[in-house]
Image (cartoon, helix red, strand yellow):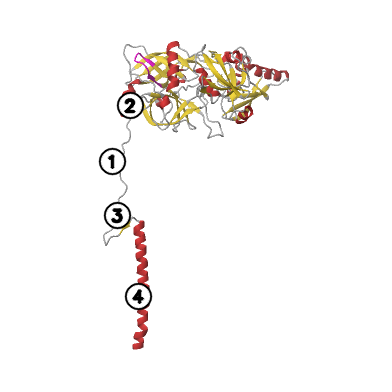
Amino acid sequence: MHQDADNKAPEKGIIGKKRGRLMATIASVAIAGAIGLGAVTSGTAPVMAEAVRLEQPVQAPSFADIVEKVSPAVVSVRVKADVKMTSNPGGSGFFDMPGFEELPDGHPLKRFFREFRGDRGFEQDRRSERRRPRPVSQGSGFFISEDGYLVTNNHVVDGGSNFTVVMDDGTEIDAKLVGTDPRTDLAVLKVDEERKFTYVDFADDEKVRVGDWVVAVGNPFGLGGTVTAGIVSARGRDIGAGPYDDFIQIDAAVNRGNSGGPAFNLTGEVVGINTAIFSPSGGNVGIAFAIPASVAKEVVGDLIKDGTVERGWLGVQIQPVSKDIAESVGLDEEKGALVADAQEGEPAAKAGIRSGDIIIAVEDKPVASPKELARLIAGFAPGNEVDVTLWRNGETENVTVTLSEMPGVETMASARGGSQSSTMDAQFGLKVTPAEDGDGLVVTDVEPGSPADDRGIRPGDIIRTVNSQAVKSGKDVEEAVSAAVKAGRKAVLVQIERDDASRFVALPTGEG
C-alpha cells in the first residue's frame, strides 16, 4: 500500500502543475481580452470606458429663412412662338431643339450638355408647310429691379413671340423681351405693371469659394417653385458652350426647367444663373453649371441700357501655347495666346501685332489661354485703348490697341476669307464660323432636313478638313467643293471633330 501511495503521489503533483499552468494561461487570455475590449480590473468591479458622444447635437443648416425672402423674386417664364413646319425625312417625330445633343452611340461615358427647355415637342406633318403655334415652353427667371426687369437664359426665350411671367403666388403677367446675348446665354425681360416687385441682387462671385453652400430656386419640369441645395463644386469651368465659358459648377439638383433660375448664397444674393447640366441620362446627376454673377451683371446692364451687348474686337486668329511652342520661343511656361494670323485692317494688325506673337497680358492681367484672351478683350467696349503685352523674339513688348466692335458671325466669316453662306448654308444646310484656335470651322446652326442634318452634324461640331484639305474659311470650303465638282465627284469627304474624336461624313456636291 505504501508503494501504491507513493505511486499515486507523483500523479497528483503532475496534474496539479498542469492545472496551475492552464489556469494561468486562461487568466492571461482573459486579461488580454479585457484590455482589448477596453475594460480594466480593479479588485472585482470592472470599469468600462465611455463611448464617444457630443454634449450638443450638430445643427443641420436650414435654408427656410433664405427661401422665404427670395421666393417672391423667382418666377416661371412661359414662352410661345409660331414655327414653320418643315418636312422631316424620318417622318413624324420629336422637335430637335437647338443646342440639344444626344449621347453618341457607342460612347456611353462621353459627356453632352443638355440645355434646359420645357417640352417643345410636336408631331410633324410632312405634308404641311404652314405655321402652327408652338406649345408652351417653360424656364425660370428672377427679378433684379423693383420696376419689373428680370433675367433668364437666352435659350429659354429663343424664338419666342409671347412671354408670360408666373409669380410664386400663381399670378400671370405678360412680359416683353428687352434684349438677348446668345454668346453668354442671357436674356432680359420687362414686366410693365404699376407695383413694386420683390427683387434680388447679384453677389460678388469673386468671394465664392469651392465648398460654399448654394440654394437653387426654379421651375423644374414645370412644377413651379422648387428649392434644392448643394455646394459649389468647382469654378472656372469651360464646357464648350461658347467663347466666354467661365462657369460655376454646383451639385444642387438642377433639371430641365431650371434654366434661367438663380443659385443663391446664404445671404440671399445671386451667385450664378443655372444654365446647363452634365447628364449622360438626361436627368440630374449632381453636376450643374451656372453663369457667374459678375458676367451676368455686366451683360444684363448692357441689355437693359442698349438691348444689345457690344464687345471689343482685336481681329486675330489665335491658338493655345503648347509645351513645345513655349520651349521653342523661350517662354518658361505654357501660357498666353499664339497669334496665328492678324487680319489686315483690323485693330491688332494696325497696332503692329503680327503672326507668331504671343499675347501674354492685357492691361497687366495675365492671359493664360485663348479663352482667357477672348474674355478679357470682350470686357472692353469698342473704341477703348488697351495695353497688350506680347512675347516676341525672346522678350516682352507692349503695344496699345484701339479696339473695334466685334462683328457678327457672317461678318467674321467674310473677314477671315470669304462668305461661308454661299456653299455651307445654301448647299449643305450649315452655318459656320472660324474656330477659336484658327484651325477649322465651328458649326453654329444646322437646318432641319438638310444634308448636314441627315448625316448627324450638330451645332458645336468642328469641320477640320474637306477632301483632306484643311479649311479655315468659307473660301477654303468653296475651293475644295469646286475641285471635287471638276473631278466629277458627287460628294466631298468632310472631317468632323466632336468631343476630341474625329469622324468623316460625305456631303453631296449637288452634281450628277
Give me the C-alpha separation between circle 4 and circle 1: 57 Å
Question: Callout 4: few (<14), some (14-19), or many (20+) C-alpha neighbours within 10 Å?
Answer: few
Question: Callout 1: few (<14), some (14-19), or many (20+) C-alpha neighbours within 10 Å?
Answer: few
Q: Quadrant of residue 28?
A: bottom left
Give me the C-alpha separation between circle 1 and circle 2: 27 Å
Relative side of 485 to 342, left or right:
right
User: Visible in this render: residue 454?
Assistant: no
- In the picture of the structure, the residue carrying the numbered disc 3 is 48
In reply to whether residue 147 is colored magenta, the answer given is yes
Q: What is the three-letter code of the residue carrying label 4?
A: Gly
Q: Residue at 32% across / 14% down in the picture?
A: 196
Q: Secondary structure at mark 3?
A: strand
Q: Quadrant of residue 268?
A: top left
- Report the quarter where the C terminus lies: top right
Give me the C-alpha separation between circle 4 and circle 2: 80 Å
The extreme bottom residue here reads: 1
Question: In the displayed structure, would residue 9 be above or below residue 226?
Answer: below
Q: What is the three-letter code of the residue carrying label 3?
A: Met
For the residues bearing labels 3 and 4, Cβ distance under 8 angstroms: no
Give me the C-alpha separation between circle 3 and circle 4: 35 Å
Question: Callout 3: few (<14), some (14-19), or many (20+) C-alpha neighbours within 10 Å?
Answer: few
What residue range appears in magenta? 140-149
